[in-house]
C-alpha cells in the first residue's frame, strides 16, 4: 500500500545509521 513511504523511512534509517557509523569512526 504505502511502499513508497516505507522506502523513505528505510532510506532515512539507513542514512541515520551510516552517519552514526561515520561519527564512530571519526
Image: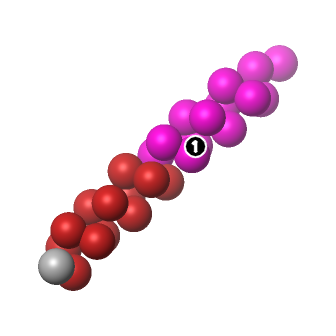
Establish if 9 lies above or below 17: above
Q: Residue at x 48, y 42 (%)?
A: 12
- How has the structure been colored for display? secondary structure
- Residue under the point 37% across and 58% down: 17
Q: Is residue 11 above or below residue 25?
A: above
Location of the C terminus by quadrant is bottom left
18 displayed left or right of 11: left
Q: Position of residue 6 (x, y in %)?
A: 66, 31
Q: Is residue 23 left or right of residue 7?
A: left
Residue 19, percent from left and from top: 32, 60
Q: Which residues are magenta?
A: 1-13
Q: Give the residue furthest to the right.
A: 1
Instruction: State the count of labels.
Output: 1
Position of residue 20 relative to residue 22, above or below, is above
Residue 8 part of the magenta-drawn span: yes
Is 16 within the magenta?
no
Residue on which the image places disc 1:
10
Up-down: is 24 above or below 17? below
Secondary structure of the residue carrying numbered label 1: helix
Q: Residue at x 68, y 38 (%)?
A: 7
Question: Is 12 placed left or right of 21 in the picture?
Answer: right
Residue furthest bottom in the image: 25
Indicate the quadrant where residue 4 lies: top right
Q: Main secondary structure of the magenta part?
A: helix
Q: In this image, 3 relative to 6: left or right?
A: right
Residue visible at 39% across and 63% down in the picture:
18
Amino acid at each position: 500500500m504505502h511502499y513508497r513511504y516505507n522506502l523513505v523511512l528505510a532510506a532515512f534509517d539507513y542514512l541515520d545509521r551510516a552517519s552514526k557509523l561515520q561519527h564512530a569512526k571519526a
